Image (tube, helix red, strand yellow):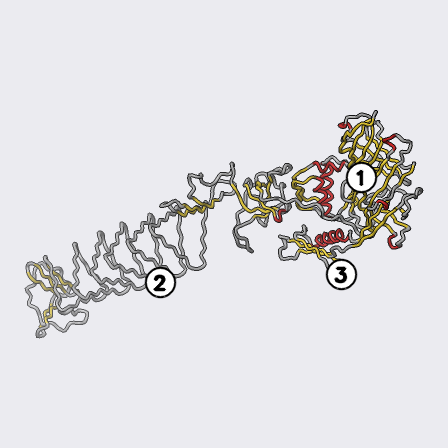
Amino acid sequence: MESELLLVARQADRSCTFEIEGLTDNFWVVRFSGSEGISSLYEFHLDVVARHIEVGELVGRNAVLKVVGVGEPRLVHGMVLRAEYTGEMRPRAMYRITLVPQHYTLLFRTDSRIFQQMSTPDIIRKVLDGAGIARRRQQFELTGTYAARDYCVQYRETDFQFISRLMEEEGIVYYFDHAATRHVMVISDRAAGAPLIAGEPTLPFRVDDNVRDKEHVGVFRMSEEIRPDHVTLRDFNLNRPDQLMEGDHAAAKPSFELYDYPGEFQEVALGKRLAKAELEAAQALKRVGRGTSDSPRLTPGFGFKLADHPRVELDGEYRVLRVHHFGEQPGTIDHTAEQALVYRCEFTCIPSAVPYRAPRATPRPQVRGVQTATVVGPAGEEVHVDEQGRVKVQFHWDREGRSDDKSSCWVRVSQAWAGNGYGAMFIPRVGHEVIVDFIEGDPDRPIITGRVYHGLNATPYTLPDEKTKSTIKTETYTGGGFNELRFEDAKGAEQVFVHAQRDMDLTVRNDRRETVGHDEHHKVMNDRKAQVVKDEHRTVGGNAMTKIGGEAHTEVVGASHTKVSGPASASFARTVDVETSGKATVGVTGGLDLKIIGAQRVSVVGSHDLTTTADSNVSVGGGASLKATGSVVVEGMTLILKASAGITLQGPGGFVAIDAGGVSIEGILLKLNNGGVALAGAASPAASPSSPSVTAPTSPTAPTPAEQAPTG
């Protein structure tokens, strides 16, 4: 700024003093400068003269700079951040003092920690409390509603960076209010308007720097520039992935859009509010006033009224954004009588009616690369998971977590495949070490992308001894067993191994084909059941052997066919029962040998037919009998009855006996059909003959059908 435009106030009743709490020493201010602004920490540098004091006695103490002008005095209360001995001014020494708010110490505290289910104001309070900032130095003037953040991480940030970032995201600003014994950080979401400066708020515009009776503005310039006029933010909500998560806010005729993703919101209403706050931050500096004044009362966050400007449209109420102070008391050094304060300030302001939000100047922390963490859950729980397959973790850097179900938010787990009701699903269990990546590098958005072994979680097989094995091996919930799919790739010992700790179910909705290049073995320790709804075909190229330790039952609803191309044999150690409710047919193209060690009984309820196309021989080792309730017919070309001891034909009327002694015929009536001769016999049945009868036979009559013997 041109020297002729610098406003200088120099008058005997203007002065500045400096006091340090706990010290009775006088500190004469030679000169000072300072900068302060909305949403920034103020810093004042003072050159003072005092007795010889060890600089360590000054650092950390509260102090107050008092600048007396024409109006109300301006107080700057703070903490001595730095004290430097700069030289001698005998009999005193010179010091350079740096005065800052106690909140400046937030820059000296770096942390990585997690906040859950807390709103932004609550997080700020907790950080300030933890840093030793007394509640009397915190003043919240918030009118908005701030929902709890599910998960918010301070990651390798200073406490100051962290709370500044949160306030910038929410459209919250802060400034400082000063008193003789304290300074207060005022945290506000008041967009438009501001409390007025202490004392008379109106500062007239005067170009004459010889004005003595009233603080005024000597230079005032107004600028306007093109700024973004439309903000659109977009994000993704995993619970409602089909919903467009977008919030925007625009001026009347938008031309320049700021679009960003991710917008850091999970509700559209919040997205709209954040977009509005970001647009207000961008538009706040569209019209900016800059000027100089001799009023030390101009303070960031407060308003003043400009009056009497040649451009009437510039008169009005303004909100101070930044101030640079310059003051000097030259008589302090040379001990001249004139020790009046020479003071000026340069300020930046905007019309009070314009909403002001601090720009997003504090960058979000970035997690560079992946990290590992340990899966955690409530005490005694081995698998802690929600309905979306998410788990909770304990990060190695988290000092406040207790390795339980409150250590983190629910963290999504990357799977090999993830569809609607299908895909892969392997849930990391409590105690597993997992690889965690972060979406957009944002520590607030962790995602598990892998798993690793460590010293306590060993591999399923000893390495490198069993390096040719690959496996998927699970562990029974609460321990005691496992399921496994294992591959062995050692040359000559290749194997696929499947182990089911309990049940194994296989469902094939269409065809299933298996090819076994060599032997196949099945061992079932209990029952085995098989059901084939339709046909079953089995082909055995060699022998087939079945051994049954107990009973065997076979039930065929339809026909049953067995074809044996070679010999067939059946051996039964005990009784064999064969029963059919229908017809039974046995066809043998070759010979049939039937050997029965014990007795054989054949019971036929209906008729019995035996047909042979060649000779038929029946050999009986003992006696043989043939009994029929009806007729018995024996028919053939030649009929030969041969007995080594004798033959007897017996009927109701007599008998014929052939034995070694000859042929005996005896009957009531003997008929020989060769001329009609009939011979009469006894009326009563004859007993078995001991020798042939000597009675001459009579001519026979024609036999009745019942008496007719078979011919041949």
Relative side of 578 to 210, left or right: left
Q: Position of residue 694 (x, y in %)?
A: 5, 64
The residue mark sitting in front, 2 or 1, is 1
Crowd rating for badge 3 (residues with CA inside 10 Å; few <14, some 14–19, many 20+): few
Q: Nearer the viewer, residue 387 or 159?
A: 159
Residue visible at 17% across and 72% down in the picture: 704
Residue 453 in view in this figure:
yes
Verify CB contact (< 8 Å) between mark 2 and mark 3.
Answer: no
Crowd rating for badge 1 (residues with CA inside 10 Å; few <14, some 14–19, many 20+): some
- Amino acid under label 1? Gly
Provide the secondary structure element on which disc 2 rests. loop
Which residue position holds label 1? 34
Which residue position holds label 3? 253
Residue 325: quarter of image:
top right
Disc with the residue nearer the chain's start (2 vs 1) = 1
Distance of mark 2 from mark 1, alpha carbons? 108 Å
Relative side of 281 to 423, left or right: right
The quadrant of the rendering that contains the C terminus is: bottom left
Q: Nearer the viewer, residue 326 or 375?
A: 326
The residue mark sitting in front, 1 or 3, is 1
* Residue 156 to residue 544: above or below: above
Which residue position holds label 2? 558
Residue 54: quarter of image:
top right
The residue mark sitting in front, 2 or 3, is 3
Disc with the residue nearer the chain's start (1 vs 3) = 1
* Residue 158 to residue 547: above or below: above
Disc with the residue nearer the chain's start (2 vs 3) = 3
- Amino acid under label 2? Gly
Q: Outermost residue, right direction? A: 213
Distance of mark 2 from mark 3, alpha carbons? 87 Å
Distance of mark 1 from mark 3, alpha carbons? 41 Å
Relative side of 329 to 247, left or right: right
